[in-house]
Amino acid sequence: MERSHTVRIAKMLMRLHGLKGWKLEIVPKFSRTYRSCYGLCHKTKKIIFLLERFTKCCNASQLVNLMLHEIAHALVGIRHDHDQVWRDKCIEIGGRPTVEQEHCVPERYQAICKLCGQFFTRSRRVANPDQHVYCCDCPTQPIIEFVDVKKLGDPEKFGYRSYL
């Protein structure tokens, strides 16, 4: 989605839900702690941050859901993280209070099961290289390595998805 459309939709939702004086920032990356997040709400600074990689490839419905998720955080405060109060507010304003696994952003570390071809992703490197990951459909066949697709010249040539 174009940056101007993203900003227009996000700011309209912020106004609609009464976030006066709040800012929107689209950032290239988050700190190490939040690197698997697509959005963050900073209540004290009154800023909602969106990950640039997400905004480039998301559709309008994914953007709206993410914004409603962050707006619910802004409305209930930081003490409520993802508890029942936050969930109720998220539903009340029209959001879905679940963490969606339908990532539109290709993850940096990817693997393909050699037997069935199932695709796996991770946002972080496997800490222990001897740790095996098993495919649900092929429990006897370990997937030995996750590939850092950022280091591949043309990931699609090897069957992986491009990393933005």
Image (cartoon, rainbow, N blue to C red):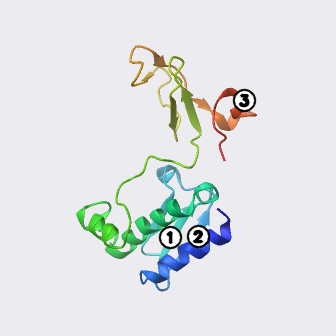
User: Residue drawn at (57%, 48%), measured in percent from left and top?
Assistant: 105
Q: Residue at x 55, y 49 (%)?
A: 104
Counting from the top left corner in percent of width and height, residue 19 is at 44, 82
Q: Specify which label sits upstream in the sequence, 3 or 2.
A: 2
- Where residue 135 appears, as percent x and y from the top left, is 43, 24
Q: CA distance from mark 3 to mark 2?
A: 34 Å
Circle on res. 75: none
Which badge, 1 or 2, comes first in the chain's sequence?
2
Would you say 134 lies left or right of 25 here?
left
Q: Secondary structure at mark 1?
A: strand
Sort mark 1 into few (<14), some (14-19) or many (20+) by Cα contacts within 10 Å. many
Residue labelled with disc 2:
25
Distance from disc 1 to disc 2, alpha carbons, whole Å, reads 6 Å
**Helix, strand or loop status at disc 3:** helix
Residue 48, disc = 1
> Is residue 102 or residue 75 the one in the foreground?
102
Residue 157's tag is 3
Give the quadrant of residue 43.
Answer: bottom left
Q: Are marks 3 and 1 in contact (CB under 8 Å)?
A: no
Q: Quick one: label 2, few (<14), some, or many (20+) residues within 10 Å?
A: some
Q: Give the residue type at disc 1.
A: Ile
At label 3, counting other C-alpha atoms closer than 10 Å, the crowd grade (few under 14, some 14-19, many 20 or more) is few
Amino acid bearing label 3: Lys
